[in-house]
Image (cartoon, helix red, strand yellow):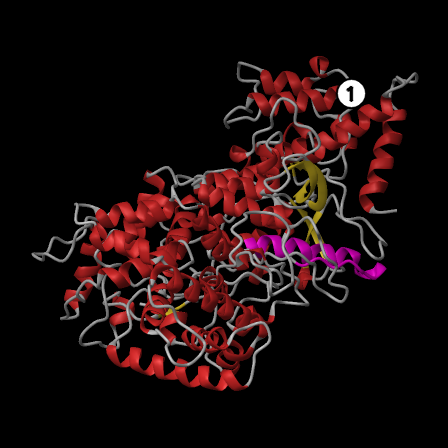
Amino acid sequence: MSCVCLWTALAAASAHAEERPNLPKDHAQRMKQGLELFRKRVSTILTKRCITCHQPNRSEADFDLTTRKHLLKGGETGAAIKTGDAAASLLMQRIIAEDDMRMPKDAPPLSKGEIQAIKQWIDLGAPYDGPLVGRESAAAPRSITDKQRNFWAFRPLVINQPQQLQNDWSTSAIDRFVLAKITQNGLQPARLTSREKLIRRATLGLRGSPPTPAEIADFLNDVKPAAWSRLVDRLLSSPAYGERWARHWLDVVRFAESYGFEHDLDNDHAYHYRDFVIWALNQDLPFDQFVQWQIAGDELEPNNPLARIATGYLAAGVHNADIAKVRVEQERYDELDDLASTVGTSMLGISIGCARCHDHKFDPVSQQNYYRFIATFERTVRGEVEIPSLAIPSKSKVLVAGEGVPPLARVYTPGPAFFTTTWFLRRGDARLKTHEVLPGFLDVLTMPKASPDQWRQLPPNAGNSTYRRSALARWLTDVEKGAGALLARVISNRIWQHHFGRGIVSTPNDFGVRGERPTHPELLDYLASELIRSGWSLKHLHRRILISATYQQGRASSPTPHDEGLFRGRRPQRLEAEIIRDQMLALSGQFDRRMYGAGTLNEDQPRRSIYFRIKRSRLIPSMTLFDAPDALQGIGQRPETTVAPQALTLMNARHIEKLAAGFAKRLIQDARLQSSVLATDTGDKLVLDPIIQQAYREALGRIPRRLELIEASDFVLQAHREYLQVKRAGLSPLESALTDFCQALFCLNEFIYVE
């Protein structure tokens, strides 16, 4: 029998030994409810507010309440409680007293919620689930030094006005921050890029597909003021914006639709979380609410299906479905580590997981801090519930995380899905327990006098949850007393990074001591403050960045090694695997723009690449070839490799050939509709210039240069002559020749990079 079960049994036996020989019929149920209340609430209150003065080594008035036996015994003034009758209990009378007899002495009184919890607990029999000694005191003194608190990432936001310089280039506060650094280095910013390049940059950056020739023409012909701002607003309002930017967030949170390990079991209902992220970004859901729902949507808004779907964030990691009996508890701590580590890197830019086996060697995160943090998720499990979703308005199964959710089945299930006590482990080994810990947050990001309980709010009908995660969610987004300032810095840096190719902090998942320092700390704080001021609107932050002259720069005419860190000029930025494919799909005429719903592993599928199914043991080959992640852990920035198989795939893969053939057929059809002289397959009259020019407009956003036009025409004519002799299945000679030409366009740096 475990220690907790043994203590529970003894507590129940003790209740039978009291002066109430005729126990009520519901006694067992009341004791069970009392134990649950003790675990959720009362043990924390007593540990935090009472045992400092009432423990074995320091028993004021000879009263020790660290065990139920001593509580019933009482002190100098007699028994402390009368079980089942709070009103007649001395303990209750002392904590509600209005005079000098009130407890705790020389300290603020208990809150109404704390008093109500103790009253209800006594009325339920005042059971304990274990002695209070050995538990960590939530009020234990912290060892964070002033120097550690003063580290740039942990300080409160500071708003400095950018330096005013005499320069016509800058148009915003962002520009003035950047310009100050550039001029300090004896340089000048780059000139603004052409409008053709600018619309392609913004459209691929915000929407993830190339601008159409009509969109380019409309923008070039719009000579009214604020034409650029209007274009940015149109792109941000496109449903494709959510699909484009959801992929960035899914990288960070290690989203996949299978569980990894040997069996790599599928979860057919995980995609709803991906749909939620797309929806949230398109709706411009305030980022603080976006974060809170993902941590504790089920506790904060239990009747809102979208808030529950958001908890798929917690369920997105690896999950071992085949555990040996001796490994059950260790595997559970591994799952808790995944949750804590993901919250740390994705939302706070801190490697919390490094403190699992020892105090963090660089950042002010102690091992005690770590175990307090994972205790937040002590009873959180993955499971499936039937609720309406974005893809299926009627009820369907959705993968969520929460307390009281039936846990997912395993191939072999030798033990519980969770444990009701979190232990401090030596060297991270579940066999080396030292003491029980209570939930808590990171000391360095919490104001010195703040308590975890101030973020914990129990609703009138609390249900089965401990509401620990909702407290964490509020702490994460609390700018004044919690981690909100760092949260805003981290997401602002991520937005900047994806627009410029590198962040103000070039280690987006590590804002700690071992991470890189911000190149423009004042600018980062300005962006974070602007985000908060706007009501945590990500679209507002996008808009502020894109309308700046900094974003609109072209290539620097005289580049230096320092340009990238100064954000001077613009270097070509490699597009992600998904966007390279989505461009080809948009050009092919086969684009299925349906949103939401289950994905597939079929590379021929005509939907956006974000709708590929992410199976950890069977990733999409063309996506991994262009550096898509394996989803085993969250990544803040994808690597950028250049290898021969990338070009070979673009030139030879069957699914790429199909997209190129679709593009070629559409070009021919459009040319025949618009031209009085039709292109033919006889070889005596091929009107290629309009077709090639249109291909360049659509694929690259510009018309071909004279030499490019000549070389492209020669290439197509030569290929056409060859295909007159050797037929290609399903394609005419002209379609075959243009298919080769379109595939060649797909291989150009100008297609897979954006300036």
- From the top left corner, tell me how far across and down residue 104 is, in percent: 57, 26
Compared with residue 503, is residue 478 higher up or lower down, i.e. above or below?
above
- Residue sitting at x 83%, y 51%: 415
* Viewer-nearest residue: 67 or 649: 649
Compared with residue 396, is residue 511 higher up or lower down, i.e. above or below?
below
- From the top left corner, tell me how far across and down residue 381 is, in percent: 70, 46
Number of numbered callouts drawn:
1
Residue picked out by circle 1: 83
Segment colored magenta: 318-342
| Main SS of residues in magenta | helix
* Viewer-nearest residue: 139 or 332: 332
Compared with residue 689, is residue 528 higher up or lower down, i.e. above or below?
above
Q: Is residue 395 magenta?
A: no
- From the top left corner, tell me how far across and down residue 626 is, in percent: 50, 72
Q: Is residue 330 magenta?
A: yes
Decide if residue 59 is in sight here: no
Q: Residues within 10 Å of mark 1 (few under 14, many from 20)?
A: many
Compared with residue 400, is residue 508 higher up or lower down, i.e. above or below?
below
Q: Amino acid at mark 1?
A: Thr
Q: Secondary structure at mark 1?
A: loop
